[in-house]
Image (cartoon, grey):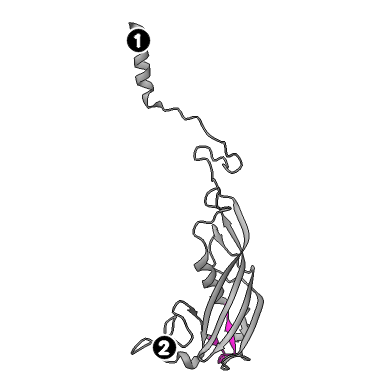
Amino acid sequence: MPRPEDSQWAVSVAQVASRAGQSKPIDAVFPAPSGIGDDVIGVAEGADVRVSGSFDSIVDGLILSARINAPVHAECTRCLKPIERDWGVDVTAFFPYESATAGRNGKNGREEKGEVEIIAGEDESEDTYPLLDNGAFADLEALIRDTLVEELPLQPLCRPDCRGLCSQCGADLNEDPDHHHDVVDNRFASLAALKAQLEAQE
């Protein structure tokens, strides 16, 4: 059975665990987990993802406040050009101690029976992840994946004012803003021909 410390995403937090008021800075690079996005937009598996912030110990667990930076590949939804850029997301996550989660289930530590309680220091909007090996390690794999997947834009653009492509010929309107086509309305061509024929008979 694999050990928690052997995970590529494991961070040792034993020195601050169970000691409220302690803080541990983190500034490390992890490989991107699989399953972040798709061919249109996402982060390639194994790409360098930097996590910078700190673990802060409270009574019932650890709070991670950090910024996640990852290289995102995307395709502009207007002009279809490839986009390669670093992208940063701020995240706050709660890692409860095992004693704090005893008798609870669910993402935000809800009790199985009785009145719902929120763990001390935990906001309802915060994501919650388990500590491993009796609180000695925090594994960031799921946190990195969940954070980036949830924050990926649905319609990535190469730039906010991208003009897109010509609907008739596919020309890039960013490179040729004056591009246009002379449109001829043929709906009245037959009437015009009949009018010309009648005028010729007069």
Q: Nearer the viewer, residue 92 or 134?
A: 92
Q: Nearer the viewer, residue 66 or 1?
A: 66
Q: Residue at x 37, y 17 (%)?
A: 193
The magenta region covers 131-140
Label 1, secondary structure: give it: helix
Q: Nearer the viewer, mark 1 or mark 2?
A: 1
Tell me where residue 129 appears, x and y as whole percent.
51, 82
Tell me where residue 183 appears, x and y as whole percent.
47, 30
Q: Is residue 68 visible?
A: yes
Examine the structure image and report whether residue 7 is included in the region drawn in magenta: no
Label 1: how many Cα within 10 Å (few below 14, some 14–19, many 20+): few
Q: Locate the N terminus and report the quarter of the image it occupies.
A: bottom right
Marked residue nearer the N-terminal end (1 or 2): 2
Query: In the drawing, does residue 14 fall left or right of residue 124?
Result: right
Q: Which residue was labeled with disc 1?
A: 199
Tell me where residue 136 appears, x and y as whole percent.
59, 90
Q: Nearer the viewer, residue 39 or 51?
A: 51
Name of the residue lying farthest toward the top: 202
Q: CA distance from mark 1 to mark 2?
A: 90 Å
Name of the residue lying farthest toward the front: 21
Quadrant of the rendered structure where residue 85 is? Answer: bottom right
Three-letter code for the amino acid on which mark 2 is drawn: Arg
Q: Which residue was labeled with disc 2?
A: 104
Tell me where residue 48 appears, x and y as whole percent.
65, 69
